[in-house]
Image (cartoon, helix red, strand yellow):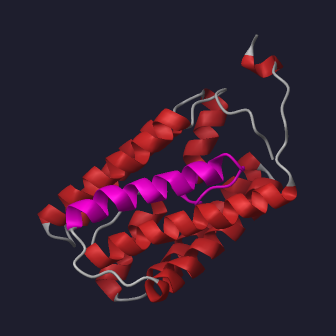
Amino acid sequence: MDPQELPTDPHRLHEDVMAMLVGTLFVALGVTFYTQATLLTGSTAGLAFLLQYATGWAFGAWFFLINLPFYWLAIRRMGWSFTLRTFATIALVSLFSELTGRWVTLEGLNPLYAALMGGSLIGIGMLILFRHRSSLGGVNILVLYLQDRYGWRAGYVQLGIDGLIMLAALMTLPIERVGLSVLGAVALNLIIALNHKPGRYMGVS
């Protein structure tokens, strides 16, 4: 049977809310790993990390501000429901990324472990959010639109954009930290690419 002909079981409101909370907590924990190890990821979060390291301002504040211009594209291309979900998601990640640093104390964190586990946590969180019609905004809005419109794999498109951000990071971070960040970005995007294929997951919100 064609996947488009399969019956769908829409997500209920409480399922969307729970997914949003769990997904953003996963992302925030990954952000905490990266902040503690002075690493970064891609997309708008990567830009927020770079600005955090360069200015000393908190990641959450930068992440919220950078995403503001992208809401226009979200409204125009993805609709109000997606945009409002994404706004709430970004606000929660901005909040939880600050609170997690107070809730969790990390001592002796191995940078390689932080890169791989932090990237995996963020990837899993993003996957949960994608499946409930939300995202982390910014570049994520663009790659989701490209997947919906042209069938391009969100993870692979994201990987290319992340590569450019990693190159920019060489001006701010030591090369070994950028190299570890690349490993984390690969782990993150492989999780999305392998698990977020068009037609595979039929849940809708």
Vertical placement of residue 190 versus 42, above or below = above
Most frequent secondary structure within the magenta stretch: helix
**Image point 57% across, 48% down: which residue?**
127
Vertical placement of residue 193 versus 199, above or below = below
Please state the total of marks drawn on the protein image.
0
List x then y, in percent, for residue 12. Answer: 86, 52
Q: Is residue 168 visible?
A: no
Q: Nearer the viewer, residue 84 or 116?
A: 116
* Res. 173 image quadrant: bottom left
Vertical placement of residue 147 versus 38, above or below = above
Q: Nearer the viewer, residue 108 or 100?
A: 108
Residue at the top extreme?
1
Compared across the picture, whether 88 is left or right of 68 comes to: right
**Image point 35% across, 58% down: which residue?**
117
**Image point 46% across, 89% down: which residue?**
102
Compared across the picture, whether 182 is left or right of 117 comes to: left
| Magenta stretch in the rendered image | 111-140
Vertical placement of residue 165 versus 58, above or below = above
Q: Nearer the viewer, residue 169 or 36?
A: 36
Compared across the picture, whether 142 is left or right of 181 comes to: right
List x then y, in percent, for residue 8. Answer: 83, 32
Quadrant housing the N terminus? top right
Q: Is residue 33 visible?
A: yes
List x then y, in percent, for residue 121. Answer: 45, 58
List x then y, in percent, for residue 33. Answer: 36, 71
Q: Nearer the viewer, residue 115 or 67?
A: 115
**Image point 84% across, 37% down: which residue?**
9
* Residue 26 located within the stretch drawn in magenta: no
* Residue 134 located within the stretch drawn in magenta: yes
